[in-house]
Image (cartoon, grey):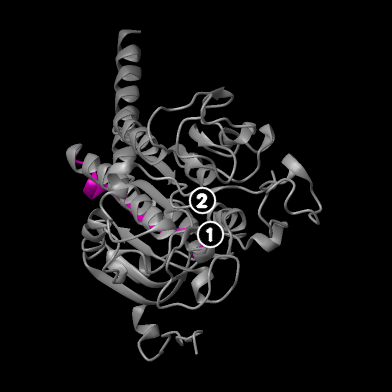
Amino acid sequence: MIKSRILIIVLTFISSLINTISAQSKPNIILIVADDAGYGDFGFHGSQLMKTPELDKFASKAMHFKQAYVTAAVCGPSRAGILTGKYQQRFGYEENNVPGYMINSVLEGDEMGLPLNQKTTANYLKDLGYKTALIGKWHQGNADKYHPTKRGFDDFYGFRGGTRSYFEYNGENPNYRKEDYLERGFGNFEESKKYLTEALADEAISYVNNNKNNPFFLMLSFNAVHTPMEAENEDLNQFPDLEGKRKQVAAMTLALDRACGRVFDELDKLGLTDDTLVIFTNDNGGPSNTNASNNYPLSGTKANHLEGGIRVPFLMRYPKQITKNSSFDFPVSTLDLLPTFYKLAGGNDKDLKDVDGVDLMPLWKKEKQSLFKNISMEPTIVNLSV
């Protein structure tokens, strides 16, 4: 009897040890998505005007995918593609889910959202033992049935809609839509007194600390630099030579950059940098007319399918496997994120028969880069001022 108990204890310990080792071997994954940023509004893309020191430093330690594309030129469908690894036309999510705006949509109001039969990146990674969280903008359906915590995310802090104020909703700054309030978990609405970009960074840092001992997937979904054009005074003061919306977007970009840098610094502080795949990208091109973003040298803007509407910044850092300050010059898609995450986390290709993206790991390992060496894919730059 005693021997049996000892054997059970030993087997339990071995099983626990194996599970711990297995968990530790899985990298953490952080996907940072900016909102409506201009392609040319980052130092690592050549901007001499914008101040993005943290992202520029990050780029020097990452692989720069120089021709990365989203699958839609507006936020909601693009994010649906990112989350599912599938072209959103396949499941009818071709428009932004904006109640009262997309009047010809088959679905109306809050019924518009990511169809419930679609499996998300969070679902896939959760099946592999990951903790999952979405912090920031959702924009995949306002109704309760579409809520992030019902789509594979264990934790949520953000807002259900597609845009909101960067400042606290209160008597001086009223809000009339439920989907715009900040929400923790499901149904716990609580506003932050901090500038929203900073508040989201705070939550991300807290999440990383609380989950540092197990593999996690964090989607940090900023709404910067989407309208409304709202910035803090200290950031506006950094751009004395600019005016109007251009001054506002520069200040908002600076806040976004600082928030990203704080998350990167926390990974360093906790010793998690080498074990974490971090991606920085954007959901579509900048809408130059509404937020004064700059997509140079690309033609087009958000909401059209010229290069400026669908080609986005795309940086990927994973020190264990990706050579720092490297680049890949040929087209990739944000559809590729899901299969890349899944394979890196130990998933099986056979589980991904229904996705359209491909695993990017062979590219950063240079296993397939030779296939592209004789292909010229540089875009044609059109001068629309002529």
For label 1, the crowd category at 10 Å Cα-Cα, with few meaning under 14, some 14 to 19 and many 20 or more, is some
Q: Position of residue 365 (x, y in %)?
A: 30, 69
Q: Position of residue 93 (x, y in %)?
A: 69, 56
Residue 260 image label: none
User: How packed is label 2: few (under 14 Cα within 10 Å), some, or many (20 or more)?
Assistant: some
Q: Which residue does the image show at 55% across and 38% down from the upper left? A: 152
**Nearer to us in this view, 144 or 170:** 170
Mark 2 and mark 1 in contact? Answer it, CB < 8 Å: yes
Amino acid type shown at disc 1: Thr
In this rendering, the count of numbered labels is: 2
Can residue 184 be seen in the rendering of this structure? Answer: no
Label 2, label 1: how far apart the Cα atoms are? 7 Å
Q: Residue furthest top?
A: 1
Label number found at residue 290: 1
Q: Give the mark nearest the N terminus, 2 or 1.
A: 2
Q: Residue at x 29, y 34 (%)?
A: 212
Q: Residue at x 39, y 84 (%)?
A: 372
In the figure, is residue 336 to the left or right of 94? left
Work out which quarter of the rendered image holds the N terminus and state it. Answer: top left
SS for dot 2: loop
Q: Position of residue 43 (x, y in %)?
A: 27, 65
Q: Is residue 299 visible?
A: yes
Mark 2 is on which residue type? Thr
Q: Which residues are magenta?
A: 271-285
Residue found 35% across the figure and 42% down from its top: 232
Q: Which residue is mark 2?
A: 227
Secondary structure found at label 1? helix
Q: Is residue 60 above or below residue 140?
A: below
Q: What is the x, y in percent for residue 301?
A: 53, 69
Q: Is residue 280 magenta?
A: yes
